[in-house]
Amino acid sequence: MHIPFDNSYAALPDAFYTRVSPTPVKAPKLLAFNGDLAKILGLSAPEMAEVAETFAGNKIPQGADPLAQLYAGHQFGNYNPQLGDGRAILLGEVIDTNGLRRDIQLKGSGRTPYSRGGDGRAWLGPVLREYVVSEAMHALGIPTTRALAAVATGEDILREQGLLPGAVLTRVAASHLRVGTFQVFAHRGQTDDLQTLTDFAISRHYPDASGPMDLLRAVCARQADLVAAWMSVGFIHGVMNTDNCSISGETIDYGPCAFMDDFRMGRVFSSIDQQGRYAFGNQPNMAIWNMAQFATALMTLRDDKEAALEEATAIIHAMPDQIEAAWLKRFAAKIGISNPDSADTDLIQSLLDLMQKDGADFTNTFRALPTAAARDQFSDRAAFDAWTQEHSARTAAEPDAVATMNAANPAVIPRNHRIEQMIVAATAGDMAPFQRLMSAFATPFSLSDADLARPPSQSEIVPATFCGT
Ligand code: AMP
Ligand code: MG
């Protein structure tokens, strides 16, 4: 197999990373390979045995320059001065067939100098969860890292639940630059390195940006869109720490994430999020909070501190309106309105209020809106009927309302109970449920497998997702 590497991160100063090779594993076995993505990346004629060896980390492909990246970050609001790739290794970058530079990274590939107490490994469950959910996110049209391969290692690893089968995920990203990558240099006062990083990020992601404040503005715009996009499909990221906040604006780090079944604004899935910091409805605030940390780091590059503070403050203060506008555009489309005005916010909000009161299923309610079946989601039918009247009056002026709704409302999303069932089966060696999910989520706006649209029964409900990755 040939991977056309073209590495740029490895040419940055030594302070940015540590060169380290993946630790070989006992018995690599290919679980999943994304042939479509491989083609886009320009991988030539991959032969499957070699794919397993390569993406397990046992065979370093020619042209790779394996390294672990340094970063820091705020975790649940507390600054951790050094994180870094504790179990991930960047093999290198390729320029894909669309001309975009992409990172190819192994996750779960062994210890690095940034592993702290960890074993550098990942178990099969979270690897397949990230594989399925990130690919579903891509199919939903939302910016995200992608999954190229999943390989079982043939080694057991120890987690709270006991011994579990190990696996390695190959992740593809526009880059792995995070807010935390900037924070580490800002906090250490390494201004030259911060300047180098800023120049690198601008040339890689925002070539039109003219300096740090322009970069900040561009990243804020992407994060505003991203958080609105997540909310429009009922997605809860679960761990929006600054080290999991990508400069490229892609969704990154599918740890304790989940898609909602019944709608609740304050919904939290992650078992480690005791305070609800990353609850569904708090995600806009957290995106803004993360961008404020980014601003704080970037400001250290400027000598004119007061002017910089004023500029950064204005950029951050613009974010609530940006998110509101992106949210309105997305949610208006979900109810069939293609050119919303601010009055539509009330119409959307009153539907969401009814949904929350009646525990309506987020995905299925929106998907059913063009039909009579939407009514079944509500126990207060009179209230829903009253809403429908208002809605019909408003959408009378929208000739393509139904098409707008169907294009904005997925028929299937990766429901948590399906992910958990898939993981249980895969752990026992049965990859059929994984294949089934991958096939249905490849076209989430058409219903190919009605049973996957069904919310969990009482016994299927998974109340929390765990970070124990
Ligand atoms: P995450 O919660 O996945 O965003 O990871 C936070 C930090 O912990 C990152 O620096 C990871 O590299 C590190 N980390 C997570 N799991 C492990 C592990 N099993 N071994 C070593 N480091 C890890
Ligand atoms: Mg992370």
Image: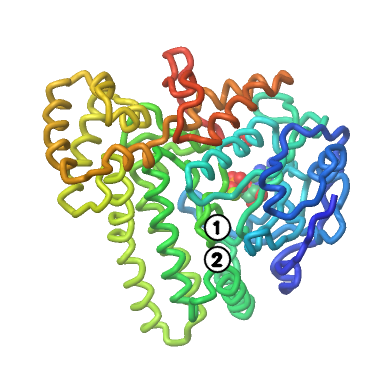
Q: Dot 2, how many residues are within 10 Å of its Cα: few (below 14), some (14-19), or many (20+)?
A: many
Name the residue: 48% across, 42% down. Answer: 140
Toward which corner of the image does residue 432 lie, by quadrant? top right
Q: Position of residue 25 (x, y in %)?
A: 85, 38
Whole-percent x, y for residue 90 in the image: 73, 56
Q: Residue at x 42, y 30 (%)?
A: 411
| Residue 189 visible in this rendered orientation of the protein | no
Q: Earlier in the sequence, mark 2 or mark 1?
A: 1
Neighbor class of circle 1 (other Cα within 10 Å; few <14, some 14-19, many 20+) is: many
Say which quarter of the image contains residue 98.
Answer: bottom right
Question: Disc 2 residue type?
Answer: Gln
Amino acid type indicated by mark 1: Gly
What colour scheme was applied to this rendering of the protein?
Answer: rainbow
Q: In this picture, is 155 found above or below 322?
A: above
Q: Position of residue 88 (x, y in %)?
A: 71, 50
Q: Are marks 2 and 1 in contact (CB under 8 Å)?
A: yes
Relative height, residue 216 to residue 369 (above, below): below
Residue named by callout 1: 73
Residue that appears at 59% across and 59% down: 72
Q: Is residue 335 visible?
A: yes
* Residue at 72% in and 61% down: 93
Instruction: Please state, as top left, top right, bottom left or bottom right, where the C terminus lies in the image.
Output: top right
The Cα–Cα distance between marks 2 and 1, rounded to whole angstroms, is: 7 Å
Q: Is mark 1 within 8 Å of ligand 1?
A: yes
* Image height of 279 relative to 340, above or below: above
User: Where 223 falls versus 268 (above or below)?
Assistant: below
Horizontal arrangement in the rendering, residue 315 relative to residue 18 (left or right): left
Q: How many marks?
A: 2
Return the x and y of residue 351 as percentages of the image width and height. 21, 35
For label 2, the residue is 183
